[in-house]
Image (tube, rainbow, N blue to C red):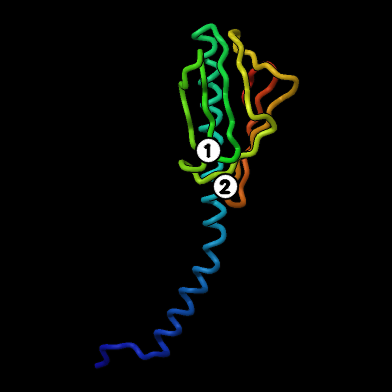
Amino acid sequence: MRNAHTLWELLAALTIVSTLAAIAAPPALRSRDRATARAAATTLRSTLASARDASLAHASAALVVVDATLATVTVIVDRDTVLRHALMGDFRSRLTASRDTIRFGPTGRAFGASNTTLVIRAGAAAETVTVSRVGRVR
């Protein structure tokens, strides 16, 4: 009766397992990147919605400061920092923005000459968040 495996049997099993891992790893990493980018975009959308709601609730302007180098988004209402999210620390995501500030007026409308586009990247995946001139977040 044999209690052990031979070296050739172990090498064959190791080859099969490593081949299966090599096939399964890239789709799993892409899926993780998509989920991370989607979660960061959802957080960014809720932060922008909170800024708009705060401007309506306080009947004053709310300023959203986007720091693309640190990937942070800060909401300021009446000179007080109300909310801050660090997308790089929470989600390990990179952030690019067409503008560095978004201002919501007392009526909830965004101020500025054009739409603001925020792009969140996590690995190979990317999500885009757009704030229109009237304050809609998409």
Instruction: Give the number of the disc on residue 65.
Output: none
Above or below, comparing residue 11 to residue 62 in the picture: below
Locate residue 76, reporting x and y percent: 52, 20
Pointer 1 residue:
40
Q: Amino acid at mark 1?
A: Ala
**Residue 108 position within the rendered picture, expressed as x and y whole percent measured from the top left:** 60, 12
> Would residue 96 be found to the left or right of residue 40 on screen?
right
Q: Residue furthest bottom?
A: 1
Task: Tell me if label 2 and label 1 are in contact, CB under 8 Å.
Answer: yes
Q: Which residue is mark 2?
A: 122
* In this picture, residue 106 sits left or right of residue 5: right
Whole-angstrom CA distance, mark 2 to mark 1, is 9 Å
**Which of these two is toward me, 110 or 46?**
110
Instruction: Please tell me which residue is depicted at 66% across the width and 34% down the height of the picture.
Output: 97
Which quarter of the image is occupied by the C terminus? top right
Residue type pointed to by label 2: Ala
Label 1 residue SS: helix
